Image: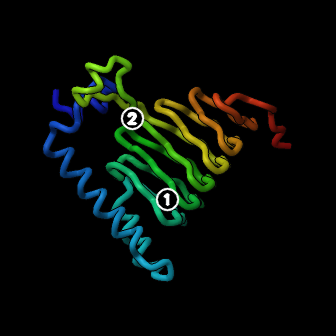
Amino acid sequence: MNEKEKIQEGFVCNPSIDKKLFAQRLKCKNLCHKYNKTYPEMMGNRQGIIIKLLGKTNGLFFIEQPFHCDYGYNIEIGANFYANHNLVILDTARVIFGNNVFVGPNCGFYTTNHPILANQRNKGLEYAYPIMVGDNVWIGGNVSVMPGVKIGDNTVIGAGSVVTKNIPDNVVAAGNPCKVLKHINQN
């Protein structure tokens, strides 16, 4: 089993020893750099770059500069997606955003994690679990979403939250760690 297959299965891996993964990360970093250095008024150029970078897009979307990710092809965004400045997506595993998702500034979605034991970390080992964000979600500024988290439909995540566990549909959740504060009646 190669390192990419280990990643996809959620096993501990060492992507730094895989030349193909290194080349894919380098290609992604170059596209992010190009995107971030493109003048804001050059909307067509920016969209062309980001479409090359992301794995799947659907309908209209907009990501403010700067934007950073690891691979790009593991990111899927739905229609009517908006992300404010300084979005970071460490997409070693898949990160899927539904439709009508709004992300505040300085947010991070981190699929990658490292072993607790220093001797394993020092070998460059890591693992990754996918992140899924439902439809009609608003994520406030300075939110961090950890590996393996699912955020439900019609949910609001308050600014400054650290989301370490799944958040259900139709709630307002906030805090460190993020927890449900109230349920939203969609009627």
Amino acid type of the residue that numbered disc 1 sits on in the rendered structure: Asn
- To which residue does mark 2 refer? 112
- Verify CB contact (< 8 Å) between mark 2 and mark 1: no
Tell me where residue 136 appears, x and y as whole percent. Answer: 67, 49
Q: Secondary structure at mark 1?
A: loop
Tell me where residue 40 appears, x and y as whole percent. Answer: 49, 77
Q: Nearer the viewer, residue 153 or 15?
A: 15
Residue 106 is tagged as: none
Q: Nearer the viewer, residue 153 or 92?
A: 92
Amino acid type of the residue that numbered disc 2 sits on in the rendered structure: Thr
Give the residue drawn at x 16%, y 26%.
Answer: 1
In this image, 49 relative to 97: left or right?
A: left
Residue 58 is tagged as: 1
In the orientation shown, which residue stands out farthest toward the bottom? 41
Give the residue drawn at x 56%, y 33%.
Answer: 150
Q: Nearer the viewer, residue 141 or 180?
A: 141
Tell me where residue 172 appears, x and y as whole percent. Answer: 75, 38
